[in-house]
Image (cartoon, rainbow, N blue to C red):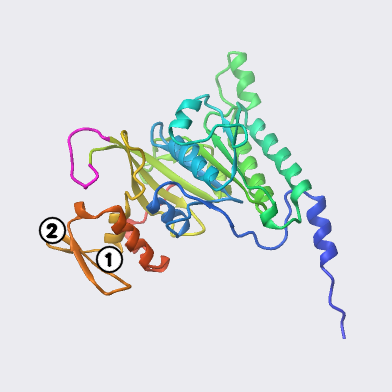
Amino acid sequence: MTKPYDISRFRKGITKSITGISTGFNDPRTWISTGNYCLNYLISGQFDHGVPLSKVTCFAGESGSGKSYICSGNLVKNAQDQGIFVILMDSENALDESWLQDLGVDTSEDKLLRIGVSMVNDVAKTMFEFVKDYKAEYDGLPDEECPKVLFVVDSLGMLQTPTSTDQFQAGNMKGDMGIKAKQLKALVSNTVNMIAPFNIGLIVTNHTYASQDMFSPDDKISGGEGFIYASSIVIAMRKKKLKQDASGAKVTDVLGIKAVCKVVKSRYAKPFEQVDVFIPYDTGMDPYSGLFDLFAKTGIFTKVGNRYKYISKSTGEEITQFRKHMTSDFYDTVMSEFTDKDFEVRVDSEETEEVT
């Protein structure tokens, strides 16, 4: 009878000696809420999840579309609430301590480390050195004994390369001939593999630019297609004026920002779905914005005249009411009564768009 092959020695040897190699499966164990239930669902397939550790997530959009609000604000705060240490790399010199504190972020040294960066190389070296030391100290230990860490880079769009800096100093404005795109792809590709076995996550923001392609009119994400392919999750964002109050009634005044978020890429939910996330100036993000549209689209809510009917899955009771009377408690009840599959979004083929 053939003796079974002992894989343990080989497994231990390759994972200990080579950074970036791991064995087994690396399903996410820790998720961080974006602060909006519907956006969480479109990213992860669950209302209470959101963005995972051990993956690379990109939020890309125009200036003022809410990228920093979600990534450097909500996600950082919610990570800290779970005991996750945050390393915030700021390339725009725009993340003021008072602004972060207003969003609920704890800026004390034992909860957050802010690092000013200017080069793609700075981010790459920081990530590599951190993961190498982390692996040396915690590799092989039970998951509960390993600290959880979230890196946030805000933003990739402002990072430079040595070539672009040298050319600027010499008065040469020709650009870096695609070097930055290649470096961003290398940064994300290597980081995805390095952090996969650990409770370490990377969230980045990036810029978009208007498309000149009449056949693909959606905004393009800067950094090249290789960067998009290498990322685990990609959310494209657009900015609109919020002219709708909490009850859904249209108003003439601009009450805040309506961040249109489209999940371009996700391994955990159906891609190319989008949600309008309301960020009123006076109250901050509405965590329930987008849910009504999701429930109506999936048939959970059915229109009856000017009202909407919902049938409780647990009691069978029919509840019919106006949209403006739907409270947060009501939405909580609906979310708690249905499984994720009950909310699978049914989209006609002509509604599906590809975003580069």
The residue positioned 43% from the left and 59% from the top of the image is: 270
Front disc: 1 or 2: 2
Q: Which residues are magenta?
A: 245-255
Mark 1 surroundings within 10 Å by alpha-carbon count, few (fewer than 14), some (14 through 19), many (20 or more): some
Check residue 246 for magenta coloring.
yes
Residue at the far left: name it. Answer: 305
Q: Nearer the viewer, residue 76 or 159?
A: 76
- In which quadrant is the N terminus drawn? bottom right
Residue 284, picture quadrant: top left
Query: Mark 1 and 2 residues: CB-CB less than 8 Å, in contact?
Result: no
Assess disc 2: are there few (<14), some (14-19) or many (≥20) residues with their C-alpha within 10 Å of its C-alpha: few
Ranked by sequence position, the earlier of labels 1 and 2 is 1
Residue 27 horizontal side relative to residue 20, left or right: left
The residue nearer to you, when weighing 346 against 143, is 143
Report the number of numbered marks: 2
Closer-to-camera residue (195/285): 285
Residue 326 on image: x %, y %: 24, 55
Residue 155 placement, left or right of 330: right
Q: Residue at x 51, y 43 (%)?
A: 58
User: Residue 24 in the image: x percent, y percent?
Assistant: 70, 63
Residue 298 lies, in percent from the top left, at: 31, 64
Instruction: Name the residue tied to disc 1.
Output: 299
Q: Would you name the residue on which mark 2 appears? A: 306
The amino acid type, in three-letter code, at marker 2 is Asn
What secondary structure characterizes most of the magenta part?
Answer: loop
* Residue found at x 69% / y 51%: 146
Q: Is residue 173 visible?
A: yes
Kindly report the distance in space between the C-alpha atoms of the residues bearing marks 1 and 2: 16 Å
- Where is residue 90? Give x, y as percent: 56, 29
- The residue under the point 36% across, 56% down is 352
